[in-house]
Amino acid sequence: MFAAGAGVSRGLQGFLPEPEGPFGIGTRVVPILDPVRVDFAAEIPRPRRVLAQLWYPTRLSGPLTPMIGDPNLPIALEAALGIPPVLGFLHSLGCHAQPSAPPISGVRPVLIFLSGMAGFRQSNLFQVEHLVSHGYIVVGVDVPGFSANVEFSDGAQTPVLPARIAAPLVEQSIRRQEDPPRIGAREYPEGIVAELADDVGAVIDSLAELSSRGVFTTVDLERIGIFGVSLGGITAAEVLRVDSRVTTGLMMDAPAPAAVAEEGLGGNAMWMTRNASSMRAERTRFGGWGEAEIAVHQSSLDTAVSKAPRAWRVDVNRLFHIDFTGAPYGSGALQQLVSGPLGGARAHAILNTVTKAFFDHTLAGAPAARLTAAVEALPEVAIAAAPESS
């Protein structure tokens, strides 16, 4: 039984399921400075910095606490998505994380989470809380320029780059064009994923530094994984390719970046997505997902998996792209408008089951047969590809 903790807010809406694991959830926010790199998203040259939030196992529990702390996030999201002011309800959503709760002693595996373009670090708290309650440390990262809005404690803010700048940078990461996109005078022939992968590297460096100073010593720097959705999934695959400290990655509804499709991956990798029919069904309802985009998404994954000796592809069909996040589920009306036919609650239960089983196998030593059994027990899920040894 957890010890009672002091609540910081009342009247919050508890839209997240109760965590199933044996641990409570603590959290703290950590600004991270990379003095070597210049911030590509800043109007005035300055060192690059990102914002990380740690969620970790604790024995403390308490009332719901606010899911987000940035008062400008709903407005920034609405502006980025080009929608009317309908996201104010985000301020009323609560989560189970207890700020500054003492972590449980002993080192634990670390998972880095990356949201999609114009996303935010708390977008997949349904996954985060599930994993942390079962003993993982999760680090959500907001990256200035591609997260919806990044607000630091000194009041500095960086909203997402305009789509006319950001979209070509993402596209270049997947499909190389002869005339590369730019930010100002600088060209990005590899797209933006190299910069975002360096952001993750700075986060890992900071975790190591915090541990060495005795500030946060429960991170197991020998067991680091990564997971992300959409652009976060594209970046996760690139991190797995270039940073040997990260040994396993879960990429959700994201094509493979060009270099990964060309070279493959040496670590453990899982792409969790849906088939082309599900993408077309979403197009019928909302538009987007042209045939060329669907073809690149599907073929890049098939190619990347074929070149990676320890890679899985898992299809969860009847989902829409938004269902890979928790974005609409604090509002019943919004969920009905944007969610796929599988439904948010079932979608998230499936994602949690597969995510935990994958990282239990690749970071915690559970046998591959247990991962396979967990996936095969879900009738909505198909294993499209798996390592021969599994």
Image (tube, grey):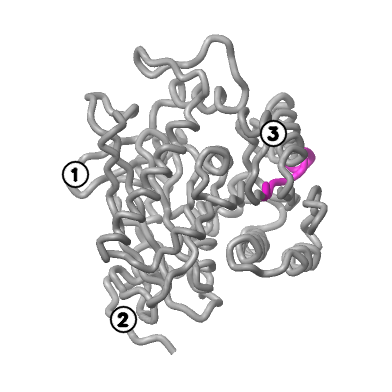
| Residue 209 or residue 14, whichever sits in front | 209
Quarter of the rendering occupied by the C terminus? bottom right
Where residue 261 sits: x, y (%)? 68, 32
Cα–Cα gap, marks 1 and 3:
38 Å
The magenta stretch is: 270-278
Q: Is residue 46 visible?
A: yes
Where residue 17 sits: x, y (%)? 53, 71
Q: Amino acid at mark 2?
A: Gly
Quadrant of the image occupied by residue 237: top right
Residue under numbered circle 2: 5
Element under disc 3: helix
Whether residue 4 sits left or right of residue 317 in the image: it is left
Quadrant of the image occupied by residue 370: bottom right
Residue under numbered circle 3: 297
N-terminal label among 1 and 3: 1
Q: Residue at x 57, y 51 (%)?
A: 247
Q: Is residue 337 visible?
A: no
Residue under numbered circle 1: 155
Asked whether 244 falls inside the magenta stretch, the response is no
Whether residue 284 sits left or right of residue 238 in the image: it is right
Q: Amino acid at mark 3?
A: His
Mark 2: few/some/many CA within 10 Å (<14, 14-19, 20+): some
